[in-house]
Each structure stands twice: as structure tokens, then as C-alpha cells.
Amino acid sequence: MGKTLQIVMLVVLGGALLVGGFSGGFIAGHLLPLDAAAPITVSSAPAAPTVSPDSQSATPQDLQTLFQPFWQAWQLIHQQYVDQPVDNTKLMQGAINGMINSLGDAHSTYMDPATYQQATADLAGSYEGIGATVDTTGSFLTIVSTFAGSPAAKAGLESGDQIVAVDHVDMTGTNPELVRQKVIGPAGTTVHLTIDRPGQTTPLEFDITRAKIDVPQASGKMLPNGIAYVQVTTFGETTTKELTAALQTLLAQKPRGLVLDLRDNGGGFVQTAIEVVSQFQGSGVVFYEQPADGSKKAYNVISGGMATKIPMVVLINEGTASASEITAGALQDYGRAKLVGVVSYGKGSEQIWTPLSDNSGAVRITVAHWLTPNGRQIDKKGLTPDVYVPMTTADRQAGRDPQLDAAVQVLMAELNGSPIPTAAPTLMLTPTPVVAPTP
């Protein structure tokens, strides 16, 4: 995903609510995984129906006058549109989509059945596609992040890349969600992408073979000088289990310090974020949930974490979003860890995902904001690192990781009692604008 949504707070199966924040998702907005899904076939209406008095009377009494123009437009479409019969299901989906879009909130969206399936599939950690999360809210489909080792990463796609053509067909003026559907596809097939990259004067061309992508949600290894390295790529169904297993293996080797890598992590389950923070912080509030009435509900650390004392540093970048920002923000507020990297994405709102009846997809409505333990607003601001270190295209092409190098230096300075290096304030970046992100 060159860089990262979705955040889900709770999953209640059986037609209840899917509570989410970004997809990060990142899961954020429309930061959806580019994975393959079975096509949804929508049959056309067998006839051109008219709106009967019974149909209009089904509208609640107090809304009948308000909805009269809607039913009038519905009937006119069926009576006058040149290409009949029209597809009633698509009309219904379009009406819902327009209603949600009228809220003017980038994270409140309608998802058709296929999109809804794709938006939740990545939390299980398996994909068929190119292995990227994308932003569908701008003029072009934009790469937010890539999975390590994915076809997108191997091809060299980067955060900020805009897909301007698919299979040599210009996507100018095409809804980015439709572009995303053109990019996804079954493993083994190839898609040709034309990319506009910031800083490049000419488009870049990529042939990418789609694949099934199984991404570990948490993993770890030992670095030189007794430093443990733990990477969390998403906050999904198996993250906590994989994280605790990695920590058990690493802590048995008596590391002196630990680097937690949350770069390009678009989020996931908020409950998982609470569980991850709880492995490193012994007590306190993980985050506050603030709904429209201004009240605050605290979500607290779960006691019994495995690594609450070891010195640590957290890596963040522009692809760190949602649940990963909750995690990094909590550890920064408590002084538990310095943040190293660049300003994070800035997705700090909570959505409720509600499946609609008859497998008609789902709506996602923003219901609250998230605040760090110190009351900091994450949404549209992101987290500012304690030590600013960028990652350039040249770094990636050369296989360099100056952010990880800096994290180790910060950790070693702390362990040795030396001054911790910081960047000049003039080098600090502003958060990635969230005009209409996905997620």
C-alpha cells in the first residue's frame, strides 16, 4: 500500500451492527484493500413500474410531503428514461449513496454488497489483489500504502501515487470507486496501471500480477545491540494472538529495548488497539470516545501486559491511521515511547457500520471522535513525531530505512543516558490533508 483503513470497534454478527472507524483503513474514509471479490449481479427490473398510492403511503406520515419529490422523480425515471427497463436495485443504491454524501462527511459512506465484503475482508489478513489500500475520495484513486512483499510493493507503487489509467483506459472523470473495482481481480491475472506520482513530470507505467496475499498482522525479530523489533501491520482478528506470540519469543531473549513499527498500518478493530496498548502500558486510559453531545467515554488499559517496562520507541508515518494512531497517541501521551517518523494520517473518528436488509450493502455513519489520553484531537491533525525523519523514494529504492535507523538511535541514546536527537521544528510536516479520505 508505497503507503497504508479502516477502523472497526466491534463486530456483532447475525445482522447487528458492525461498529467501525476508519478501513484503514483504513479502512479511513474509503481506505479499502484492493482485493478480489465475487462479482455481484444485479438483475434489471422486469417492467417499468409506477408509484402506487400504496408505495407513497409506506412513507411515514410526517415525511410524505418531504418525500413526494423523491417518488415523483422515481416515477419519471421509469416513465421517461430512454433505456428501459431501469435497474431498481441500482436506483435504490444510488439514492442511499446520494443521501449519505449530502452529509459532507468523508467517512460516512454507503457500501454496496461487494464493497462491504471487501471493506471487512482485510481484517482477516487474506487478500486477492495487488496488496494495497487506497483512497477513493479524490479525483483519482490514490495509493495510501502497500503490504510488504505484495505485488504492489514489489512493483514499486508508493503512497500518493494516483491511478490515472487502468489497462490503458483513461480514468479521468471516473469515480475512484469504479476505478478500484477495475484494479481488483483474481490471483494470477495482470493489470496495467498508469500512475501520476508527485514530483514526477511524466506518468509511470506498471504491469502488476495480482496474487493471494497473506499478511502477518504482527511479527518480530531481534536487531543488533539487543533491540527487539515488532511490526504490527493491521489491527485485525489475529493481531493480539500474533503479537503476544512475538513478544514471548523476543522477551525470552532479554532485549534491552523495543521498537514498535506502526508504519503503513491503516487501522482495524479498536478493541484490538486497546489490547495492543495494554501489552506496553500498565494502566490508564487508552482513548476517549466523544460523541455529538460532547461527553467523553474512557476506554481503559487491560492489566497484565507483557512489555510494560521495557524502553521502547514507536515508528509512525503518513500511512499510520486510525487504530494505529490511537495506539501511538496513547504511548506518546504517557511518555511510554517516543514517536519517530513523520506526521501520521489523521483519522480519529468513529463510524457505525450497519448492514442493510436483503444483503443490500451497508451504511457507515460517523458517530464520534477519538481523543488521546491527554485529550488531543487526532482527526485531520494526525500525530506529530518527537523525532522527525522522512523516508524518500531514493531510500526505498536503495533498500535504506532511515526511520528505523533513527528509532534505534533514539532508543540507544535513552538506554545510554545520552541526549535524544530531535529534528529542527522547521522540518516538521503538517498532517496529510483529510479532505475526503477513505478508508
Image (tube, rainbow, N blue to C red):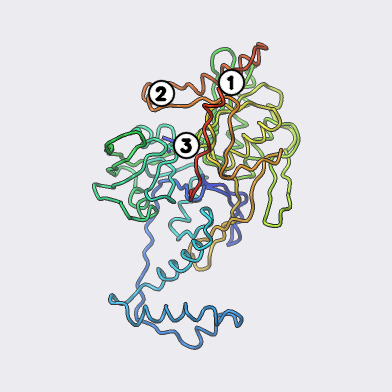
CA separation in Å, label 3 and label 1: 33 Å
Q: Quadrant of residue 94?
A: bottom left
Which is in the foreground here, disc 1 or disc 2? Answer: 1
399 vs 424, left or right, is left
Q: Amino acid at mark 1?
A: Thr
Is 135 drawn above or below residue 14 in the view shown?
Answer: above
97 vs 315, left or right, is left
Q: Residues within 10 Å of mark 2 (few under 14, many from 20)?
A: few
397 vs 279, left or right, is left
Task: Identify the secondary structure beneath mark 1.
Answer: loop
Of all residues, the one furthest to the left in this rendering is 168
CA separation in Å, label 1 and label 2: 20 Å
Q: Amino acid at mark 3?
A: Val
Residue identifier under label 3: 215
Residue identifier under label 1: 422
Residue identifier under label 2: 395
The residue shown at (30%, 40%) is 209
Evaluate if marks 1 and 2 touch, with contact meaning CB atoms under 8 Å apart: no
Residue 322, percent from left and from top: 57, 43
Residue 153, percent from left and from top: 38, 34
